[in-house]
Amino acid sequence: MSYIQEQDPPDKSCIFETGPGKKHEKESLLLCRDEKTVVLLNRFPYANGHLLVAPSRHIADISDLQPDESAALFDMIRESVAILRKNNNPDGFNVGLNLGAVAGAGHPDHLHFHVVPRWEGDHNFMTVLSEVRTIPEHIESTFDQLLPDFQKLLKSNGKKI
Ligand SMILES: [Zn+2]
């Protein structure tokens, strides 16, 4: 109960609160929602398969995470990397956090990690940030491609893919 009482009223426009109660929703690019975490496919990706992994709770700062939320969040980041590795065969990843609008957070009120697959010869990450982004694969096909593995993940109760 203390969780619920401490929680700010969710911002209706917060992308991490879209499709409430749903585990998956293509319209909002919601790949996975479990008890403590949310995974969205970024609508404005830096690279194909760019994911946003967030705690379910609407909190802005990393220091507001409870220990069980931290553990769940990191587990989901690990699983997301595994799913992207399996489906998109990247050569590497950028996994990162922007805290605050000044640091580049697009949704500064709701903490979220970026999981960005990288390929040999793609653009430098920081260069890509300031450029018009061209994504070769349509975002909906990426969603369809990744969804089955996130569905499997929820069914397996968080066991590794
Ligand atoms: Zn939120």
Image (cartoon, rainbow, N blue to C red):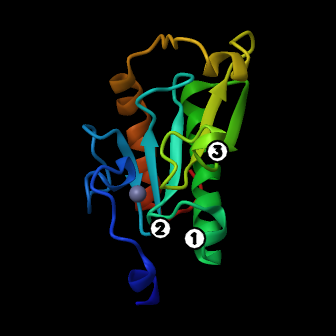
Q: Are marks 2 and 3 in contact (CB under 8 Å)?
A: no
Disc 1 element = helix
* Type of amino acid at the residue the image marks with label 2: Lys
Q: Which mark is residue 92?
A: none
- Can you identify the residue that label 1 sits on? 69
Q: Which residue: 34% across, 38% down?
A: 29
Residue under label 2, please give it. Answer: 36
Q: Judge the density around disc 1: few (<14), some (14-19), many (≥20) Cα neighbours within 10 Å.
A: some
Sequence-wise first label, 1 or 3? 1
Label 2 or label 1, whichever comes before in sequence order: 2
Q: Which residue is mark 3?
A: 98
What residue lies at 42% left-to-right and 75% top-to-bottom?
Answer: 7
Q: Residue furthest bottom?
A: 1
Residue at mark 2 to residue at mark 1: CA–CA distance: 6 Å
Q: Residues within 10 Å of mark 3 (few under 14, many from 20)?
A: some
| Occupied quadrant, residue 127 | top right
Looking at the image, residue 124 sits to the left or right of residue 9; the answer is: right
Quarter assignment of residue 155:
bottom left
Disc 3 on helix, strand or loop?
Answer: loop
Percent coordinates x, y for residue 113 in the rendering: 60, 47
Q: Are marks 2 and 1 in contact (CB under 8 Å)?
A: yes
Earlier-in-chain disc, 2 versus 3: 2
Q: Tell which tag, 2 or 3, sits nearer the viewer.
A: 3
SS state under label 2: loop
- Residue 81 pos. (x, y %): 63, 42
